[in-house]
Image (spheres, coloured by chain):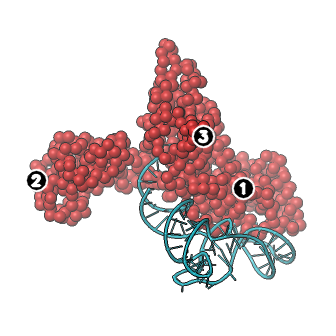
Amino acid sequence: MRQSKLISRKHKEKPAEAQLISHIYLLRGGYMRPVANGIYSLLTPAKRIQQKIEAIIREEMNKIDGQEVQMPVVLPAELWQESGRWDSVQSELLRFKDRSRHDMLLAMTHEEGVVALARTEVTSYKDYPFMLYQIQTKFRDEARSRGGLIRVREFTMKDAYSFHTSMADLDQYYDRCAQAYHKIFSRCGVPEVVSIQSDNGMMGGKIAHEYQLLCHDGEDKVVVCPTCQTYANSEVASCSFPAEPEPLLPLEKIETPNVKTIEELEAFTKLPATKMAKMVFYTTTAGETIAVLVRGDVEVNECKLQKLLRSEISFATDDEVVKTGAVPGFACAIGLTCRVFVDYSVANGYNMLCGANQEGWHMRNFNALRDISQAEVVDIATVKEGDICPKCGKSLELSRGIEVGNIFKLGDKYTRVMHMTYTDEKGQEQTPIMGCYGIGVGRLLASVIEARHDDYGPIWPLSIAPWQVQINAMGLEKPGIRETAEKIYAGLEAAGIETLFDDRGLSAGVQFAEADLMGIPLRLIVAPRALEQGMVEYKIRGTDEKGLVPVEQVQTFVEKWLAEEMKKYI
RNA sequence: CGGAAUGUAGCGCAGUCUGGUAGCGCACUUGUCUGGGGGGCAAGUGGUCGCGGGUUCAAAUCCCGCCAUUCCGACCA
């Protein structure tokens, strides 16, 4: 492609609205243009990258027996009413009516769509297992899109759905898919993407993993164990709370005038927060007030708690707290009329300090399991930096990540309610179980920039670069320059090598700056000084590697270099 | 949905406090000199100042309402 014909305006200055590096370079490099909040048009360079990512995904999905299909973006409400998500998903689902006042939706995911398709196509156990996938536009009316392509409302997604006759078969396929995912990210030039244990949100099912690119500007919090190399989303991460055993001492009231918070208690009693039990009260959407007991230095993980209660929660008001029999500020779990959840951080502790349910008083030597009859011991702690890994006992670290893909074991959540069945060997009707597997294509594209860039622009891995080679000609009107550049360009194009030829005759500075924004791996520079010796200069983007190649050997050099470089991404 | 900020040419911004006929840099067009990291000179093009209403002889500027965008938070397969 000739750059003189490329519609892709470059900008010197950082656009005011962009903060993330990928967002900045995508706009500055003329990869995309904003159309509305969280909605973008992609220009040719980004579209080419996206197509390459899609091709890699397609290959790997096909290798694990995936069958590519295409379902509609617009679905009738009935399908989502069948699954129950028409009501359970809120404003994130964009709904509208067609001309005959029929309720419709823009699909944000396709469990319903694929079950509707598969249940009429597949009725015998002989067809199992199978996997259907598509690469297609999704729309999610996000409350807050941000970060360019990292979090958008309209985006391209690969979504895959597998169907099985047994859990064991799903387990096996799930692992196969996990392997394919690692291959995809590795081939796209981000092998460091890690698989982590995750929350399953509105998807249902039990087991779920996210594929996270760990990076400073990620929006998800990830708990990392550097020792045993395990990762978990902070929404579900656990840690252990070992404590030295102590003889259980009798409860003892102590006077603590006006001492309410953990900090005040630490100052007053000279005890560390790890020896205190903290009570927090929440109210569910059904109006039930519950008490939660965590160690003084631990924060309640509300995500875990909501999952446990199967309800959204909010902090209880003082009135609601009083109704349970507790005294705000001096609450004690003993003798409350509500459910009491005790986190392991407290359950594993000995002789802790807690409230006395009396204004101005606390109690020593509280032992949750001994002292509370209705205690429900659960894991509801938020992991923080330095907490203990439950697997290996070493310190955990906190990191940030971008979720570029995810996989779920859905079980029969959708197949059951949507009455998908097959006939087994014995002629019995059975309900299949499902797995689903997503990759955000645009988000992956942006994530590669987050992981592969320098101060001048993206450094595209050859496997997904918009073009493989860039030709820059210095002083186009100087003797031999245009002819040589044109000849090299024609040769590369004829060999099927994707080449971006800067034929605009601009100054070196402009050409190099814009070439850096395009991030093409191999750059050929045709310039007078080298050409006098019959040489063309080459430069590898993102490295210091450069050198001279005789003009007549350029074609061979490029072909060899590309073949060698491409080995990194197979 | 809460909190904050912003909206003036394709991009980045000044002008608003103190009302008086729209500015700068980049980009773009033409010419010319340059030619290895966003180059110089000269001449140009492009804006109903987010939208609507009000105050005033006069509004980008003051007042009211709306809309949009961004940031922080809530939320999020």
Q: What type is the residue that disc 1 sits on?
A: Leu
Disc on the earlier residue, 1 or 3: 3
Residue A136 is marked as: none
Residue position for label 1:
A522
Q: What type is the residue that disc 2 sits on?
A: Glu
Vertically, is A544 above or below A410? Answer: below
Residue B58, x across and y down, in percent? 62, 79
Q: Gap in Å between the C-alphas at discs 2 and 3?
A: 70 Å
Q: Residue at x 35, y 43 (%)?
A: A311
Q: Residues within 10 Å of mark 2 (few under 14, many from 20)?
A: few
Q: Using the image as rendered, state which of residue A70 and residue A501 is in the foreground.
A: A70
Can you see residue A187? no
Q: Gap in Å between the C-alphas at discs 1 and 3?
A: 50 Å
Q: Using the image as rendered, state which of residue B36 and residue A203 is in the foreground.
A: A203
Chain under label 2?
A: A
Residue A252 is marked as: 2
> As drawn, which residue projects farthest toward the top?
A426
Residue A98 is marked as: 3
Task: Name the secondary structure under disc 3.
Answer: loop
Chain A on-screen colour: red
Chain under label 3?
A: A
Left or right: residue A414 versus residue A306 is right
Label 2–label 3 contact, CB within 8 A: no
Left or right: residue A16 versus residue A398 is right
Q: Gap in Å between the C-alphas at discs 2 and 1?
A: 75 Å
Q: What type is the residue that disc 3 sits on?
A: Asp
Total numbered labels: 3
Residue A138, x across and y down, in percent? 58, 44
Can you see residue A496? yes
Residue A12, x across and y down, in percent? 66, 68
Chain B on-screen colour: cyan
